[in-house]
Image (tube, rainbow, N blue to C red):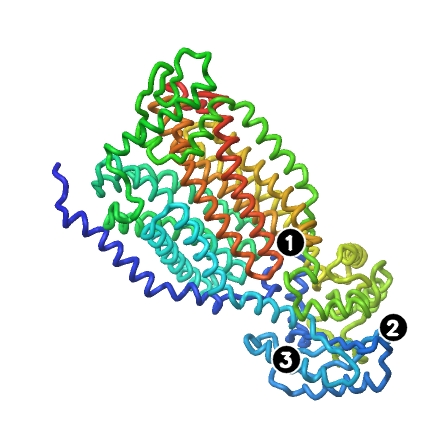
Amino acid sequence: MSAPPRWARRLLPLLLLVVWLAIGAGLGPFAGRLGEVATNDQAAFLPRSAESTQVLEAQKAFRQEESLPALVVWTAEDGKRLDASARSAATRALASLAGEPGVVGAPSPALPSEDGQALRAVVPLRPDLGDALAPTLDDIRTAAGSVPGTDALVGGPAATQADLSDAFAGIDGLLLGVALATVLAILLLVYRSVLLPLMIILGAVFSLGLACAVVYVLADHGVVRVDGQVQGILSILVIGAATDYALLLAVRYREELTARDGDRFPAMRAALRQTVGPVAASAATVGLGLLALLLSDLTNNRALGPVGAIGIACAVLGALTFLPAALVLLGRAAYWPARPKATARARRDAARDGEVVAADLKAGAAKAGDVKAGGVKAGGVKTPDRDALGDAHTVWRRIAALVDRSPRAVWAWTLAALLAGAAFAPTLDARGVPLDEIFVKDAPSVAAQRQLGEHFPGGAGNPTVVIADAGSAAEVRSLADRVDGVDSAAVLTAAGPGRPGEPLVADGRVRIDVTLEDAVDSDAAKETVARLRAALHSVPEADALVGGYTAQQYDTRQTAERDRLLIVPVVLAIILVILVGLLRSLLLPLLLVATVALNFAATLGVSSLVFRHVLGFTGTDPAVPLYGFVFLVALGVDYNIFLMSRVREETVTHGTREGMRRGLLATGGVITSAGVVLAATFAALGVIPLAFLVQIAFIVAFGVLLDTLVVRSLLVPALVRDIGSAVWWPGALRRRA
C-alpha cells in the first residue's frame, strides 16, 4: 500500500493545530475564571457524616446563624486596665455600625477580660458579602479604632475568610506565571532549544485552558466543588503532567528523526507507537489514584479527585495531539539550534560513546573473557545501537556502568539512606495546623486571635456549639459546665448571644454555646470536645450534638486518619494492577510499588524535620499526608513506568542486563529533566502564603526529586540488575531474557 500524498499527511496535523488554537483562544480565559465558581468557605469542606457537620446544618434553624461573626478586641496602649469609660466608648463605636448594609442586627456590647486589660465584642455580618467583605471589615476597624487609648484588632471567622480570599487573590496570575516561567527556564537550559520549550509550554497552557473550562462548567452546575486549594493544585498538576508527557514524546521523536534521516511522518508514527503505552499507563495511575479520593469523607478531598483526574486527561490529550502535530510540521527545526544529527554522524558519535562505555564496563568485569553488555567485547569495540547511546550524557553512561558493575552495593547504600529518612516519618505531626500558623505571613485575623488568647479564655469568641432537645436544655447546660476544660456554658436566648432572656427554641431544639478554657485550635481543646461529647451523649433524651470550630477540627482529624487507612491500600492496588498489565510481570510491579512507597516514607521523614526545624511549623494539616501519598506514589510510579517500559522493550532483543543499561541510558536525561520540571512546578505552590500549600509543595517537590535522582536512577536499576531475568516472573519475557 503506497504512502498517502504529502498534502494529505500535512492535513491532519494542520487540522489538529487549528482545533487547539481555537481551544486556546476560546477556552484559555477559563484558567483565570475558576475563582468565579470557587468557594473558600471552609464550612463547605467538612466531613460529610461528622457530628460537627450535623450541628452546622441544625444551626440554620436559628436565625442568629444567618451571619458571619467578626470579633473585635481592644487592648490598652499603655498595658494598663481599661475602665468603664473605655468599655462604653467601645460599645458606642460598634453601635454606630448597626444598620450598615453588611451588618446583620446589632453588634454585641464590649465585654471586659478578667485582667481588665482588654475588651471584646462581636459584629454579625452577612455571610454572602463576597468582595464587599474586606471593605466592611475596614469599616469595623475604623469604628473600633476610634476608642481613645486603645489598639483595636478584628478577627474571628469573618476576618479569617477575608484573609483566605486575600491569600488566594493572586492564584490565577501569580501561581501560573511562576510555574510557567520556571518550566520554560528549565527547558531552555536543559534542551538548548528555542522552539521546543515554547511548543511544550503552549501545549500545557492549552491543556490547562481546556481543563479549567470543563471544571468551570461542572462546578457551575454543582457537579464538582472548587476552592482555592483545588484551583491551585489543578494548575500545577496540569502544567507538570503535560510537560512530562510532552518531554517523553519529544525525546523519542528526536531519536526516530535521527534514525530515519529526518523523515518526520514515519518518525512521529514510531515515536507515538512507543510512547502512547507508557503515557497512558502513567496517566491512569495518577488519574485513578486521584479518583480514589472519592472514597474520602472529607469534601475537599472528594473535590480534588475528579477535578485532578480531569486535569490529567486534558494533559494527556494535549501531549498526544497538539505536540505531535506541531513537531511533525516543524520537523528537525523544532530542536533548533541543537537539531538531531544525521544518521551517519550519529553512528560515529555512538561508536565513540561505545568506547567510553567499554572502558567503564571493562574495569568492572576484567575477570570475564567477554564484556557483552552494550555489544562491547574485551578484544574490541562493537558499535552500539544508536537509539540506546546516541544522545546519552556522560553522567548517565557513568551511572549505568556503576549499576552494572556493583549493583548490590548501589541498592544497599540507597536503601539504607531511604530507610534512615523513613525512620523519622512517625514524627510528622498531622493533627492540624494552629490558627496562628495557617497563614505563612502574619495576617490580621491571626494577630487578633493572638490578642484574644492572651486576655480571654481560649475559646472566647469562637464557642463550641451544642444543639440539644429543648426539654433537656437546663440539664445539658449544667452538665456541659462541669466538664473538665470548659470555662462556661450558656443557652442562646431570643435576644441574642450573651444576652439575658428566654431560650430561643427552633424545631424543639436549643443551642448552647460552650466556651473552652484552652485555645480552640489546641490539642487540649480537642480533648475537651471528646469529653464533652461523651458526657452529653450519656443523656439519650437530650439527643445532643457537639459542633463548632474545635469539633470540626477534631472530626476532620479523625476522618483524615480513617481516609488514609482506606485510600492508601486502594491506590496501591490500582497502581499494582496497571503495572502488571503494562509490564506483564508480577515480581517487578511489586518491587516498583515497594520502592515508591519507601520513597514516600523517606520524604515524610525529611519533611517532618524540615517543617519543624527549618520552616517553624508545629503541626501539619491532616490532609497533607494523604495528598502527598497520592501525588508522590502515583507520580513516582510514572517515572518507573517510563524507565521500565523502555527496559522491557530493550530486554526483548538484548536480555535483562543489557536492557536495563540501555533503558537507563535512553531515558536517564529525559526522566531527570521531567522530574526537575515537575518538582519546580509543585514548588511554585509555595508562592501562596498558606501553610497547607507550602507543606504540599515541599513534600511533592522533594519527594519527586528523591524519586527521580535516587529511586529511579539507582535503587530500581540496581535491584533489577542484581535480580536478573527473574524480575519478569512469571511472564514469557523471563524465558526469553
At 67% from the left and 83% from the top, the residue drawn is 142
Camera-nearest residue between 577 and 88? 88
For disc 2, the neighbor class at 10 Å (few under 14, some 14 to 19, many from 20) is few
Q: Is residue 128 above or below residue 318?
A: below
Amino acid, disc 2: Asp
Which of the pair 397/670 is nearer the observer? 397
Q: Amino acid at mark 3?
A: Asp
Three-letter amino acid code at the position of disc 1: Asp
Callout 3 secondary element: helix
Q: Quadrant of residue 284?
A: top left
Earlier residue among tags 1 and 2: 2
Image quadrant for the N terminus? top left
Residue topped by disc 3: 138
Q: Position of residue 81 (x, y in %)?
A: 87, 78
Q: Which badge, 3 or 1, comes first in the chain's sequence?
A: 3
Other residues around mark 3 within 10 Å, as few (<14) / some (14–19) / many (≥20): few
Estimate the spatial distance between the alpha carbons at disc 3 and disc 2, rounded to whole Å.
Answer: 28 Å
